[in-house]
Structure formats: structure tokens, C-alpha cells
């Protein structure tokens, strides 16, 4: 049975290249497109080594005079793919590399369709993913992420001149980027409004990067590594950090309105004075997070583990704390007007004066083991120490 899609191997592309040169065709010649009953974009994907419909793959080969089209396909890649599926739980993920591709053109002069088509090809080219766009007068710089093998393949095709021909756009330069430069890029650009839907930082490795004060609003950072990163004062409004690694990250003073951090690892993170208004922190483990002075107005903390957490002077107005674990937490000076505290666990939790709580709520919390300013023995209570943030 023929596979649903096929892609050309490097050796196969070399054979096709020799065949098309004999006919005097370019890599996206109109005659070739007509004979294969395909499109320029599909032919470009073929040359980029991207999988296309097997029927079209066959027609492209036959049109250029190659009868044995199966010898052109990348059979080895399919075999490697099968092995990776079988050993999925034991695979070692190679470190990500970053490369900047500079296009010699003004953004105002280049056709959006051509640019988007080029970006789409580069995204799939060897498995790289689009990360950021930087636009200056006379040039457009595109930042991509991939394995070392992916990046070297792109560089090889660039130096051979084939990449320029495939994209049909003049490429000025390609160079690798270190994490320090990557952080500067993000700080400068944030998410570009010029190419909505193109920029994506998902899965990016920014461990230890200095992004303090950066504009990361509306950024897709899902699955990214931000261990020990400095995000203090950063604008993270509507940002998606789901599944990201934020261990020991500094988010102090960050603005995080409706931040999505579902399944993120926030162990030892510093969120002091951060704006987490309306954030979804449901069922999060925040027992070793510094939330002192944080704005958690109307945040969803339902079922969250806040045991031993530093919540001093935090704004918890309207927050959903139902079913949360606040054992040994320090809430002195915290504002709790309108907070949902149903079924909350508060053994040895220190509430100070219990700002915003009604007399009935105070009594119910005391019965569960909470300690208020006027309760006997309160001043002798020492909460579990919570780090103020580690880099």
C-alpha cells in the first residue's frame, strides 16, 4: 500500500535536481507545475524535503522523467520515525538551537502572501519552528528554533543557494543565536503585532534568561523552559504559560492579567507583588511559592495547595479558595473580601486580623484551626519559611 504522504531524501533531491537541469527547468518551473498537475507552493515543499501527498510526489517525479519515483522518497526517515514512536518513553530530546534568517526586503514592499509562504516552508524545513519577527528598515529577520541537525541543514541549503531558490525570496544572511541574544530579541520585540498568528515561543528554552520588564503580553510560552529566568516586572497579560517550567523563576511585580499557567511548574518561584488578577491557578501546587503582596483578585485557586505559602498583604478579594489547602500559610494583612472559602483547610494558618472576613467566617475558620491576631498563642506562631525567590 502506498503511504498517504511522502517526502524526498537528500540523495533523491540530488537525482531530481540533475534531471530538471537536463530539461533546463527551474525548481518551480511553470511547465513542470502543469505536467505534474500541482502548484508552486507544493513544488517548493517538495524541494524543502517536506512531506506531500504521495500521488503528487509521484507525478512530480514522473514529469521530470524519473520512473523509479520510490527511490527518491526518504524511506529511512519513515523507519526512524517508527522507532521513535516505539521508544517514545525512552527518547532523549536533543537541545534546541536558534538561528536568525535575514530577508533583504522592506516589510512594506514585500507581498504578505510570499512572506507567509516562505515562513510556512521554513517552519517545516527540517522540523524548525517559528519564534520571533524583527523588522528594520530594509530587512526582515526571522528567528527559528530546531535541533542542531535541523539548523545545519538550513545553513547548508542556504550556502548552496538552493534555499533562496526554493523560497523565491532573497536571503541576506543566516547566523546562529546564543541565549543572551535571544533574550534581547524578546525584550525588544515581545509579540509582533505586524504578523499576527505567526510568532510563537512555545517550547522555547529560556532557562536563566534576563527578561525583566519585557513585553510578553499575548505570548505563547506553553511548554517552555523558564527555570531561574528573571521575569520581574514583565508584562504577561493574557500570556499562555501552560505546561512551562518556572522553577525558581522571578516573576516579582510582573503584570499577569488572566495568565494561563495550567500544568506549569512554579516550585520556588517568586511571585511577590505580581498581578495575577483573574488568573487560573486551579489545583496548582503553590506551597513553595512567594505570593506576598500579589494581586489575586478574582483568581481561581480552587483546590490549590497553598500550604505554608507566604500570602502576606496579598489581595484575595473575590478569589475562589474553595477546597484549597492553606495549612500553615501566612495571610497576615491579606484582603479576603468576597473570597470563597468553602471547604478550605486552614490548620495553623495565620490570618492576622482577617481583613474582609465576617465574624461568622472567622469563627468557622478558627474552629478549623486557623489563628487570628486576637487568638491565644498567636504571637508565638512561626509560619513555615518560604523563599523570597531564587535565581
Image: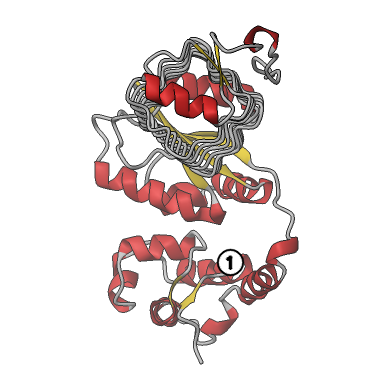
Q: Nearer the viewer, residue 240 or 86?
A: 240
Q: Position of residue 270 (x, y in %)?
A: 59, 20
* Rendered position, 70 above or below 248: below
Instruction: Label 1, secondary structure: give it.
Output: helix
Q: Position of residue 218 (x, y in %)?
A: 36, 32
Q: Position of residue 197 (x, y in %)?
A: 32, 42
* Rendered position, 339 above or below 111: above
* Rendered position, 281 above or below 154: above
Q: Nearer the viewer, residue 275 or 153?
A: 275
Q: Nearer the viewer, residue 299 or 56?
A: 299
At horizontal 51% and vertical 37% (from top left) the residue drawn is: 324
Residue at numbered disc 1 = 14
Q: In the figure, is residue 193 to the left or right of 307?
A: left
At horizontal 61% and vertical 45% (from top left) the residue drawn is: 151
Q: In the figure, is residue 238 to the left or right of 19?
A: left
At horizontal 27% and vertical 74% (from top left) the residue drawn is: 34
Q: In the figure, is residue 285 to the left or right of 135?
A: right
Mark yes or no: residue 171 visible: no
Q: Position of residue 183 (x, y in %)?
A: 56, 23
* Rendered position, 213 above or below 247: above
Residue 237 falls in image quadrant: top left
Residue 109 falls in image quadrant: top left
Q: Quadrant of the C terminus?
A: top right
Mark yes or no: residue 278 visible: yes
Q: Residues within 10 Å of mark 1 (few under 14, many from 20)?
A: few
Amino acid at each position: 500500500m502506498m503511504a498517504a504522504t511522502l517526502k524526498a531524501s537528500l540523495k533523491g533531491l540530488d537525482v531530481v535536481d540533475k534531471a530538471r537541469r537536463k530539461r533546463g527547468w527551474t525548481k518551480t518551473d511553470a511547465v513542470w507545475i502543469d505536467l505534474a498537475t500541482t502548484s508552486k507552493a507544493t513544488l517548493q515543499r517538495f524541494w524543502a524535503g517536506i512531506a506531500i501527498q504521495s500521488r503528487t510526489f509521484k507525478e512530480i517525479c514522473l514529469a521530470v522523467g524519473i520512473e523509479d519515483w520510490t527511490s527518491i522518497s526518504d524511506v529511512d526517515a519513515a523507519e526512524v520515525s517508527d522507532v521513535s514512536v516505539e521508544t517514545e518513553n525512552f527518547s532523549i530530546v536533543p537541545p534546541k538551537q536558534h538561528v536568525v534568517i535575514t530577508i533583504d526586503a522592506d516589510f512594506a514592499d514585500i507581498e504578505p502572501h510570499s512572506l507567509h509562504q516562505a515562513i510556512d516552508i521554513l517552519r517545516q524545513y527540517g522540523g524548525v519552528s517559528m519564534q520571533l519577527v524583527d523588522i528594520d528598515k530594509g530587512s526582515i529577520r526571522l528567528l527559528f528554533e530546531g535541533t542542531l541537525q535541523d539548523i545545519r541543514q538550513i545553513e547548508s541549503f542556504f550556502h548552496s543557494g538552493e534555499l533562496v531558490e526554493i523560497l523565491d525570496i532573497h536571503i541576506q544572511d543566516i547566523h546562529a543565536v546564543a541565549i543572551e541574544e535571544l533574550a534581547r530579541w524578546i525584550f525588544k520585540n515581545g509579540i509582533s503585532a505586524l504578523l499576527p498568528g505567526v510568532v510563537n515561543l512555545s517550547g522555547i528554552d529560556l532557562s536563566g534568561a534576563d527578561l525583566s520588564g519585557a513585553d510578553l503580553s499575548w505570548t505563547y510560552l506553553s511548554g517552555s523552559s523558564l527555570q531561574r529566568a528573571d521575569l520581574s516586572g514583565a508584562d504577561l497579560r493574557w500570556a499562555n504559560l501552560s505546561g512551562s517550567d518556572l522553577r525558581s523563576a522571578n516573576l516579582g511585580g510582573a503584570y499577569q492579567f488572566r495568565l494561563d499557567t495550567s500544568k506549569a511548574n512554579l516550585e520556588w518561584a517568586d511571585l511577590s507583588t505580581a498581578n495575577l488578577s483573574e488568573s487560573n491557578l486551579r489545583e496548582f501546587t503553590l506551597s513553595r511559592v512567594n505570593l506576598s503582596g500579589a494581586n489575586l483578585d478574582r483568581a481561581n485557586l480552587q483546590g490549590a495547595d497553598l500550604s505554608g505559602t507566604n500570602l502576606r498583604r496579598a489581595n484575595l478579594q473575590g478569589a475562589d479558595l474553595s477546597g484549597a489547602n492553606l495549612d500553615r500559610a501566612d495571610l497576615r494583612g491579606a484582603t479576603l473580601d468576597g473570597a470563597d472559602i468553602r471547604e478550605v483547610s486552614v490548620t495553623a494558618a495565620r490570618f492576622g486580623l482577617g481583613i474582609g472576613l465576617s465574624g461568622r467566617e472567622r469563627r468557622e475558620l478558627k474552629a478549623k484551626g486557623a489563628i487570628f491576631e486576637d487568638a491565644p498563642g498567636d504571637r508565638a506562631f512561626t509560619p513555615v519559611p518560604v523563599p523570597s525567590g531564587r535565581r
